[in-house]
Amino acid sequence: MSILFGGIRQLGMVVHDCEEAMRQWGRLGIGPFFTMRFTVDDFIFRGKPSPAPDVTLCFAHSGPLQVELIQQHNDVPSVWREFLDSGCEGTQHVAAWYADHPTFDAKKAELVSKGLPLIQEGGSRAADARFAYFDSGEPGGLMIEISEALVPAGAAARLHMEQAAEQWDGVQLVADRR
């Protein structure tokens, strides 16, 4: 992963219940969580524009590694819905992060040229950040996400979450809900 992507920055977990998953991770010493309800902008699934998933995203850090919990609330097609519908719950993807649009675009083009199937993509217009999920072809279906999580707004949020994790006393499980 480090050679191809520059390192894994995030472990993505798809879950049925974010509240319960946060409690489980909290018992392992991971927290506090920052949560948000989010509808994906400009969503493309399997190469075609698609209705947007409505998800709750929960983020916490363990050092520089981010744990992301994803709970999808609607039934539109997505990699998250497919994962749950296949009977799985838990680790669904690892992610590498990029700080600008040209680097993200170059990495996306490189992965496509290497034959990794691009399964879904979208983003947040408000944060001016995009993501793309690729099928790794690995047993168990682990996906690879690339995202623009290091654009200025994302980098500031990540730093804030890392600092909160360093100072966390294990009591307040959720630091912020949006």
Image: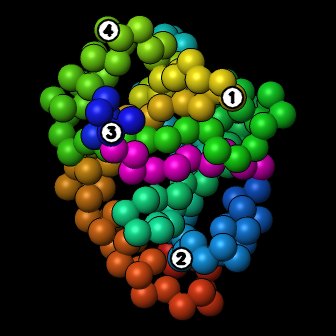
Q: Amino acid at mark 3?
A: Ser
Q: Position of residue 7 (x, y in %)?
A: 33, 44
Q: Secondary structure at mark 2?
A: loop
Task: Spot the residue most to the front.
Answer: 3
Of tags 4 and 1, the one toward the viewer is 1
Reading the image, the residue beneath label 2 is: 32
Give the residue drawn at x 43%, y 59%: 65
Q: Amino acid at mark 1?
A: Gly
Q: Is residue 164 left or right of residue 59?
A: left
Q: CA distance from mark 3 to mark 1?
A: 20 Å
Q: Position of residue 94 (x, y in %)?
A: 49, 41
Residue 140 has which mark? 1
Of tags 3 and 2, the one toward the viewer is 3
Reading the image, the residue beneath label 3 is: 2
Give the residue drawn at x 33%, y 65%: 157
Reading the image, the residue beneath label 4 is: 113
In which quadrant will I find the N terminus? top left
Q: Position of residue 172 (x, y in %)?
A: 60, 86
Mark 2 and mark 4 in contact (Cβ < 8 Å)?
no
Q: Quadrant of residue 96?
A: top left
Q: Badge 2, how many Cα within 10 Å: few under 14, some, many 20+?
A: many
Q: Amino acid at mark 2?
A: Pro
Task: Decide: is 113 above or below 141.
Answer: above
Q: CA distance from mark 4 to mark 1?
A: 23 Å
Mark 1 and mark 3 in contact (Cβ < 8 Å)?
no
Q: Secondary structure at mark 1?
A: helix
The span picked out in magenta is: 7-16
Q: Position of residue 109 (x, y in %)?
A: 28, 16
